[in-house]
Image (tube, helix red, strand yellow):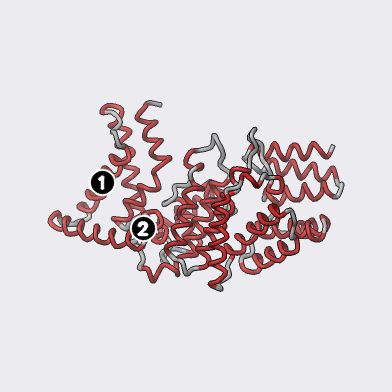
Amino acid sequence: MNGASRAAQAVARASHARLVALLAARTRDLAAAEDALAEAFRAALETWPTRGVPDNPEAWLLTTARRTLGHAARHLGVRQAALPALAQLAEEAEARAQAAIPDERLALLFVCAHPAIAEADRAPLMLQAVLGLDAARIAGPFLVAPATMGQRLSRAKARIRDAGLAFAVPEPSELPARLDNVLEAIYAAYGSGWDAIDGADPRRRGLAEEALWLARLTAELLPDQAEALGLAALLLHCEARRPARRDAEGRFVPLAQQDFSRWDRAMLAEAEALLGRAAALGQLGKFQLEAAIQSLHATSLVAGKAAPNALVALYAGLLAVAPSLGAAVGHAAALAEAAGAEAGLARLEALAGAASYQPAWALRAHLLARLGRSAAAREAFTQAMGLTEDKAVREFLAARQAEIG
């Protein structure tokens, strides 16, 4: 690979989503923005090897893509004489949008929550078009096969193109109606970047930070929306513990064994303040409940006093508001602490759809080991190890399996 190719790949990893957002913010056409940027990268790979990599590759790509968009507009019959007026209108609209939504990526997330787009496709479309994830990474948080997700995204873009849907940044009064989809996308983006550790794809390593930034920005933009505050609180609680998730040798450390002195106290305080503000609004939702669960975990560990019954109650509330396989496995784990391993295992084994869900196998393995069912526990540990890509987690599970004998 030559220097030009390496430079193009570096920009693609670090800035693809931001460049698409900048292009689409002006054109209001997501598909055209993606196509123009792809054409700009093709031009870069043709010209940079002979002319040299420009001092600012991002600016070169953005300028080239915007030129492509301008040519496309003229080919569609937009008169040259009207282009200055159109450009001025676009700049004025962009300035208004930035005043309402002070980040191009966040603005485009709300654009992708357009009511004409099928609701099930909105969050995945945001993750691909705005945050730059591929279908395989998007499929994980939504518990579907990568091929299925790829087909969904292709069909969604085809419907947008065939319907001639014109993207426009919504008015401030329209934001609350689109908020749920935006929060889901930010949450899924954070989940995709959560497991990234040293040596992983640089774009994934920065994804958790970008998701946290967008969550904070959304909470500032919509301070009267409790779930926006709840999501920011949830991600802050999770991110505050990141330094303690690995020991000095890079080994995985489960939450119950983490050194809480390594947690980021400023983030925890910010999370608690946001959670308190959300509770005062009286709009209970799943992100607030998930944040409350993380808050309870943190306070229990710091105080050295578990609260298993409270944890069971929070998970029960989460299942009532937003049932999911992850919440059900968490409820089973809490039940095992409150009522014993048999109760937790019975709850776990009653779940449908857990056969390929790694956390379910990991919990099953630990509960079987606690009950002395060694052969079944070893098999469950093997299944759990086979379902994770994280080497440190596999080594942790292997060590627990070896302890069984």
Residue at 79%, 36% in the rendered image: 402
| Residue 378 appears left or right of 267 | right
**Element on which disc 1 rests:** helix
Would you say residue 164 is visible in this rendering? no
Q: Secondary structure at mark 2?
A: loop
**Relative vertical location of residue 242 with respect to residue 106 in this rendering, above or below:** above
Asked if residue 170 shows in the view, the reply is: yes
Which one is nearer the viewer's eye here, 249 or 4?
Answer: 249
The residue where tag 2 is placed is 102
Q: Which residue is mark 1?
A: 68
- Identify the amino acid type marked 1: Thr
Q: Residue at x 29, y 41 (%)?
A: 59
x%, y% of residue 331?
A: 71, 60
Up the image or down, 357 lies above or below 197; here it is below
Quadrant holding the N terminus:
top left
Where residue 183 appears, as percent x and y from the top left, is 50, 60
Three-letter amino acid code at disc 2? Pro
Q: CA distance from mark 2 to mark 1?
A: 26 Å
